[in-house]
Amino acid sequence: MTNKQPTRASQTREKTERKKVWTPPSYLDTPNAPDGFRHRWVRTEVLGYVDTKNVQGRLRSGYELVRADEYGEDEYPVITEGKYSGVIGHGGLVLTRVPIEIAQQRAAYYANLASENVEAVDNDLMKEQDRRMPINIDKQSRTTFGGKKS
């Protein structure tokens, strides 16, 4: 005869379950972007002042406004009046989409611009160098833990 007793792990299962942790709601949830696109929030106003330059600049560089009727089955905050009526938006931001190729080219452009700026600063610093007091530009980081080994 076999003894079919419950295992100890099955008896203590309710104690090992993790409690659900509360997190604040996100006001900037977005619907899934179509294939080949990324969604980005774009500022339309700051402290009550309309920021047309920012929105128009993004639209000229390939961004498109995302309308709420494109995602009819889901509930997203919609701007109900004004210039951006019908567009998904919240708190001075509107949702836009941009093709991934444009987003990658934009990121590469600004990364290149940043590296050129760092190189220019380094070159300017090296011009001020004196042979009696050389300047070493060390661009490596090191992480150490603990004290000296004996």
Image (tube, rainbow, N blue to C red):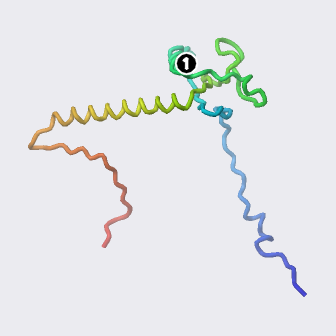
Q: Position of residue 109 (x, y in %)?
A: 41, 29
Q: How many marks?
A: 1
Residue drawn where x is 9% and y is 42% of the image: 131
**Image quadrant containing the C terminus:** bottom left
Q: Position of residue 135 (x, y in %)?
A: 18, 43
Q: Which residue is mark 1?
A: 59
Seen in the picture, residue 58 relative to 131 is either above or below; the reply is above
Crowd rating for badge 1 (residues with CA inside 10 Å; few <14, some 14–19, many 20+): some
Q: Position of residue 87 (x, y in %)?
A: 67, 20
In this rendering, would 145 be left or right of 24? left
Residue drawn where x is 21% and y is 32% of the image: 124
In this rendering, would 143 be left or right of 94? left
In this rendering, would 17 be left or right of 117? right
User: In terms of image quadrants, where is residue 10?
Assistant: bottom right
User: In terms of image quadrants, where is residue 18?
Assistant: bottom right
Q: Residue furthest left?
A: 132
User: In terms of image quadrants, where is residue 147?
Assistant: bottom left
Residue drawn where x is 26% and y is 31% of the image: 120
Nearer to me, 99 or 90: 99
User: What amino acid type is highlighted by mark number 1?
Assistant: Leu
In this rendering, would 100 be left or right of 24? left
